Image (tube, helix red, strand yellow):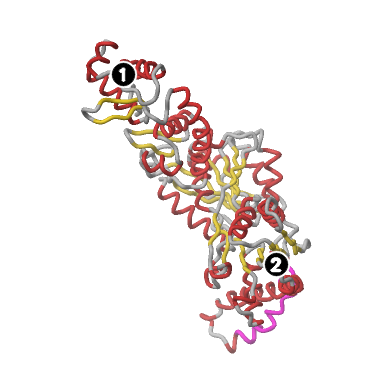
Amino acid sequence: MQQKKAPVLEKTILRIRGMMDSLPAGNQLPSVRVLSGMLTVSPVTIMRAINRLKSEGLISGRWGKGNRIGETIQTEKAYFNEERGAFRCARNQFKQDIINGSYPTHLPLPSLNQLAIKYNISYPTLKKVLQSLIDDSIIKRSGTKYYFFTNRTMSKVRIAVVAFGLDRRNIKIETERERTFYRLLSSAALDLNVEIEFISYNDYLEEPVFYTPANESLHYYLSQRGICGIILSSYHMNNSAECLSRLLTLNLPVSAWIEDSRILDSVEKYGARYRKLTFFDSSYSTIPGYDVGTYLISKGHRHIAFLSPFHASPWSQNRLKGLKKAISGQIGASLIPMVLTDAINDYVYMSKVLAKSAFEECFTATALEHDIHNFLAPRINALKYEHDILRRDALIFSDIKPLIDNVGADRSVTALVCVNDLIAKLVNEYWNDLGLTREQRKALIGFDNSFTSIEQQISTYEFNTQGEIQNMINHLRYPETSLYKKDIPVIRISGRVIERGSTR
């Protein structure tokens, strides 16, 4: 609970401030005994008022030396004018840090001194910022501690995750990014006392189906289980926008994870009209490209190339836009787009591989029966997967090889930005095969912070999946907070550049 303010003390502080307004900076205030008589309050109240004004930087003084009006702030009006801009900047940055996951909900915020230093503001301005966030139901106070939303142990709440799956027992998880998402989601749910329940959705049938545990209708299941909100994972769906439209009929808060270009159409269609819907995006916006461009400019690069065989996709186009924005104000800087527009992602190439895969010819039923023991047969699927990945990468590389060679031949280009880590890996391995030394290579950077980028020491951009997840859960638990109230509710979350050997 927030501590109640003493009316006599607050009134005394206001009267002393009024007295200070008529005096120049550096003037000494009357003694505590004199002030007590002038204002007809006890000496204890005067001492408390002076201590408050000291903590705000308006009064300076030492024991036995008297108290003087602060040299840096002459009047409350001047103080307000100076701090007003700092208040707005600090408040906006504080909200962005909350969105980016800097402050976990289950832990108290840093101390007031740490926060004042971090946001480079005075103690009274910080107090105003915190109070404004309390008023907007973004943070809460308990005793002397402040928390993002709440510090109280709540009864466990249930959240449903709707994701593509062929049956009710399994959802489809293929990419490293998906695995990271679900791993972090499980960890965040444990920290936030949230129970996650998965519901599969298959829209490759004549009629789309939600698979609930006992074959109940989706509405009945959610109401019986006490689900407070839904996270929509749009990966692998045939039409994620249609799935979203069905979920919106349930009148529950929905956190939509933008990982499918088709769901972007829903932002304009539903965003401004459905107050319980918020879209969360860390990879489809221009922010990643801008951050990477800013990083390369800071390293001294002025002529940068962008390589993408997936430029039919919005995420590739937006990364290029972000790069252009980053270098637009740099004198003499240039950006060379080297893009192909036939594919939206690597699945387009994989579909070509699967359409004419010759893998099965190497492992016929006869070969399996005579050469491989039954208990070893399950490994065939792993071999087939690796075979298909290899052929996919070969197709991609055959398309981008001329672009890579063009970049290599252009001596003015010093940095190559690849649309993702897969392309950066192919470039790096090609340069290895050519035997290029570090000095002969361009600075190389990708997006995703995949295991491959760690293994090959490729600089990359790490999307803030942890921040996305924390915000998705908190939107469902606290849908009324002003943090998620926008005309078009899309929360864009910044990540960070991970610097490794390829850009040093």
- Residue 408 position in % (x across, y down): 71, 73
Residue projecting furthest to the right: 342
Q: Is residue 203 visible?
A: no
In the figure, 227 relative to 459: above or below? above
Q: Element under label 2?
A: loop
In the foreground, 18 or 490? 18
Closer to the N terminus: mark 1 or mark 2? 1
Dividing the image into 4 quarters, which one contains the C terminus?
bottom right
Residue 33 falls in image quadrant: top left
Q: Amino acid at mark 2?
A: Val
Q: Residues within 10 Å of mark 2 (few under 14, many from 20)?
A: some
For mark 1, give the secondary structure. Answer: helix
Q: Does 109 appear in magenta? A: no
| Above or below, comparing residue 161 to residue 478 in the picture | below
Badge 1 density bin: few <14, some 14–19, many ≥20, Cα 10 Å: some
Q: Which residues are magenta?
A: 351-368
Q: Which residue is mark 2?
A: 413
Is residue 57 shown left or right of residue 452? left
The spot of residue 254 in percent (x, y) is: 58, 41
Q: Is residue 95 left or right of 326 when viewed as pictured?
A: left
Is residue 22 toward the left or the right of residue 490 in the image? left
Q: Which residue is mark 1?
A: 9
Could you tell me which residue is drawn at 67 percent across and 52 percent down?
322
